[in-house]
Structure formats: C-alpha cells, structure tokens
Amino acid sequence: MAESNNDVIDSCKNTAETKLLLVDNGFKTKANFENDSVSDESCEKPVKGFIKVPKILKKCLPPRGKPAKFFTIILLCSAIWGTLYSMTGKSALPGGNIFAIYTLLICTSSAGFLLNLFSVPPIFGMLVVGFILRNVPNIDFAKDINPQWSSNLRSVALAVILLRSGLGLDIQALKKLKYTVSRLAFTPCLTEAVTIAISAYFILGMPWLWGFQLGFILSAGSPAVVVPQVLVLQEKGYGIQKGVPTLVVAATSCDDVLAISLFGVFYGVAFSDGNLLFNIFRGPLETVIGLLGGFVIGMLLWYIPSIKGH
C-alpha cells in the first residue's frame, strides 16, 4: 500500500488536481508541497506514448449537426442489416428476399427524401426508383422479392394509409360535411377510372375490362399522395376551422375503398372461372364485411377496457 501511494505522489506532484487529490486522501498535507522539487511545467509536458491529435480533427470529431445525423443513419442501417442477417441468414445476402426488400426500402426512402427537399411528393421518387430497380438490367435486384411478400406489403401499406386517414378525422366537422364528402369521394374516383379506361382502350389497345382494372388501380393510389400532404397542412393549422382537412381525408378514404371494390368487380369478371354473379358482388361484399367487422371491434373497444377500471 505504501509503495502504491509513493507511485501516485511521484507521478505528478505539483499539479493542482493532484494536490487536491493527495490532500483529500490523507497522503500529504498542504505544507509538504512546499518542499517538493518538481515544477508545474514538468507535469504539463505530454506523456510519451500518447498521440497528439491535430486541431482539425479536434474540430471535426465527434461529428456534429448534419454529418452526425448522416453517420447515425448509416450505422443504424448497418446494424439493422446485421440483425436481419443474424436472424435470416442467406436471405439477407445479395440475391435473397430480405436483402431485396431492405435495399429497396433504403433506396426508395432516400429518393423520396431528396425529392421532398424540392417540394415534390416523395411517392413520385419512390415509384421511379422502384421502376428502375425492377426493370433495369444488372441492378434489377427487386425481382428477387417473393411475390407473396410483395402482395402482403402492399396490403399493409394500404392499411397504414387508411389508418392514418381515420386518425386524422374530426367527427364534428365530418357530420357537417357528410353530403359534400359523398360527392367528393365518388366523383373524382369514377372520373379518373373512366378516363384511364377510355385512354387505355383507344391508345394502348387494351380490352375494356383490363382498362377499367388499370383505371381503378391508378385511382386507388391517389390517397397515398394526398393524405400525407393534407396531414402536414393540418399540423400547421391550415383549414382546420372550416374542416377542409377532414373533408379531403374522409373523401380520399372513401375514394380508396370504392376503387378497390370496383377493381375487385372487374378483376372477378375478367378472370371468372366459376359463378359470375358471385365474382361481380365479391368486391362490395368484402367491403360490407369489413365495415361490419370494424363496427363490432369498435364497439368492443368502446367498452373494453372499462373507463372506470384501473
């Protein structure tokens, strides 16, 4: 113990921090420092073996601001990929399903972010990048995505859009504008689908059934562009008093439901291999079942859990 104390004292005797440390621990008294022969300057000299960091690196490290955010995103993406690889193995390597989905997500998100800087809807950049990664040779790794996964992811994306739409509704404003919502919901969807179907028939030479399927597919994508922008305007306080965000969001939600239902009708007729009447009413029937299921679940969540319970 005595040898270790002497080593501590001999290392750097006369610096202010060392003096306080030695006095507080009872190794020496303040009077003992008067007889010490080591100067403060000798303790300020750099210890051999330590690398002197240049001033430029001191200013750059650690990274701050936008560079720090950029490096953080890269590290997070790398960590997520490492986690996926540890869980799925070869599927997270190039040529695998998970790798294709993850890379597609990163590329489309980056393109959407860049276009958003120029006030362009992010979904446009995502569509362009998705088209490139699926069809351009040598970089068309999106073709490695399992079709079943792709279908399920599209369904999840649609559910997220409709869920955000429902959470952004103002029920009081919706009651006042219910008739306006019905007109605004159905007219644009039908007009857009009919216009696309006519154009596809005369310009592309597609059959009418295929033309209407194309029309309702494209019209169903409108809420993906409209809803995020309207929610941003709602957060900034634009049109809230007159209920404009509620009107547009509710109309786009109904627009989406109508487009999907009618697409199901034309799809069932075009690929009918059984009861034609059932295929025609299959889309509207699924919509009604979905409304009833949502109503029942909503009533259950209204009473369960109980407001009075803890």
Image (cartoon, helix red, strand yellow):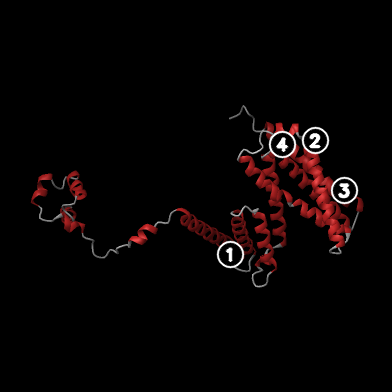
Query: Badge 3 is on which residue?
Result: 281
Query: Badge 1 is on which residue?
Result: 89
**Callout 3: SS:** helix
**What is the total number of numbered labels drawn onto the structure image?**
4
Image position, residue 62 (x, y; %): 40, 56
Image position, residue 110 (x, y; %): 59, 58
Name which of mark 1 and mark 2 comes first in the sequence.
Answer: 1
Nearer to us of marks 1 and 3 is 3
Image position, residue 278 (x, y; %): 89, 50
Q: What is the number of the mark on residue 298?
A: 4
Name which of mark 3 and mark 4 comes first in the sequence.
Answer: 3
Name which residue lies at 63% across and 69% down: 95
**Does the residue at mark 2 contact the one at mark 3 (Cβ under 8 Å)?**
no
The correct choice, above or below, for 262 with respect to 177 in the image is below
Q: Quadrant of residue 130?
A: bottom right
Query: Badge 2 is on which residue?
Result: 179
